[in-house]
Image (cartoon, helix red, strand yellow):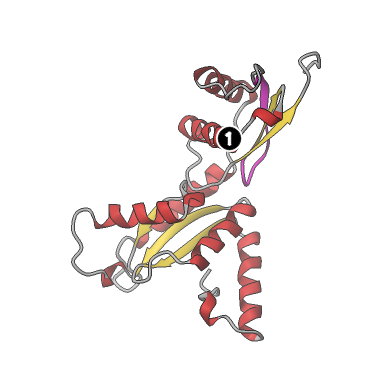
């Protein structure tokens, strides 16, 4: 994403073409390296790049560069910086964060293993039987909120794609499935299968209890 510059500096012509090329590169890549300048922190442009990468279903690794320029570091500095990124970019909560210095070569050897892991998880396939076990257990442990006496019943789930791993959950009433509950299911899938460094997608579909699988 080095070709994408900060919004305030973006102009028409060559620069606009460069931005378009960078976005195209993200969509054609397997894993996005999101480079954050440690002296600036995460910017709106960084967040947008993360959204584009997520929409494309690509794995993503956050690399915080120029860590050598941060003064007065102490034992909790990395944790504090990490919390700020997680807070300002919750859509990238699954992405590993590596603090490096391209100048001094600090921690740069950690980048490739993280990229490889993100790639592998973005192509990970879960058997239907194991997937159903995790999803049905999640429903049993914490059922969705019922409305007007009607409860959500999960029938079965299946994986329908990779990059990003995509799952379809069949229920009796999709209107009762809130965004917060989908986030809960996503967390359960990550607890069970990892999926570090990759977005995952959950699609809810409705089926009648009388409909046979």
- Examine the structure image and report whether residue 39 is included in the region drawn in magenta: no
Instruction: Name the residue located 49 percent from the left edge and 61 percent from the top edge.
Output: 33
Left or right of residue 135: residue 76 = left
Residue at the limit of the structure toward the bottom, as seen here:
13
Disc 1 crowd rating (10 Å Cα; few below 14, some 14-19, many 20+) is: some
Q: Nearer the viewer, residue 49 or 30?
A: 49
- Quadrant of the image occupied by residue 128: top right
Instruction: Point out residue 138 in the picture as x, y percentages from the top left corner.
Output: 53, 23
Q: Position of residue 89 (x, y in %)?
A: 47, 55
Picture quadrant where residue 139 is located: top right
Vertical position of residue 142 compared to residue 22: above or below: above
User: Residue 90 in the image: x percent, y percent?
Assistant: 47, 50
Residue at 59% over, 30% down: 126
Q: Which residues are magenta?
A: 152-166
As drawn, which residue projects farthest toward the top?
A: 210
Give the residue drawn at x 52%, y 79%.
8
Magenta stretch: helix, strand or loop mostly = strand
Q: Quadrant of the C terminus?
A: top right
| Residue identifier under label 1 | 182
Q: Residue at x 18, y 66 (%)?
A: 72
Q: Is residue 16 above or below residue 96?
A: below
Where on the picture, by quarter, is residue 202?
Answer: top right
């Amino acid at each position: 994403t080095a070709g994408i510059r900060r919004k305030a500096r973006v102009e028409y012509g060559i620069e606009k073409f460069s931005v378009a090329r960078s976005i195209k590169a993200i969509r054609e890549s397997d894993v996005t390296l999101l480079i954050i300048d440690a002296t600036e922190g995460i910017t709106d442009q960084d967040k947008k790049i993360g959204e584009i990468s997520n929409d494309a279903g690509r794995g993503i690794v956050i690399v915080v560069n120029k860590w050598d320029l941060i003064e007065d570091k102490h034992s909790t500095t990395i944790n504090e910086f990490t919390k700020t990124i997680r807070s300002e970019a919750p859509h990238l909560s699954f992405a590993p964060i590596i603090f490096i210095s391209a100048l001094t070569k600090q921690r740069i050897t950690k980048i490739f293993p993280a990229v490889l892991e993100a790639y592998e998880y973005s192509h990970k396939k879960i058997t239907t039987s194991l997937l159903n076990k995790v999803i049905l257990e999640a429903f049993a442990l914490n059922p969705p909120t019922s409305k007007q006496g009607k409860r959500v019943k999960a029938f079965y789930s299946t994986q329908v794609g990779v990059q990003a791993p995509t799952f379809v959950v069949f229920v009796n009433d999709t209107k009762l499935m809130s965004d917060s509950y989908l986030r809960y299911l996503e967390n359960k899938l990550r607890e069970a299968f990892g999926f570090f460094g990759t977005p995952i997608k959950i699609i809810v579909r409705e089926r009648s209890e009388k409909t046979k699988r």
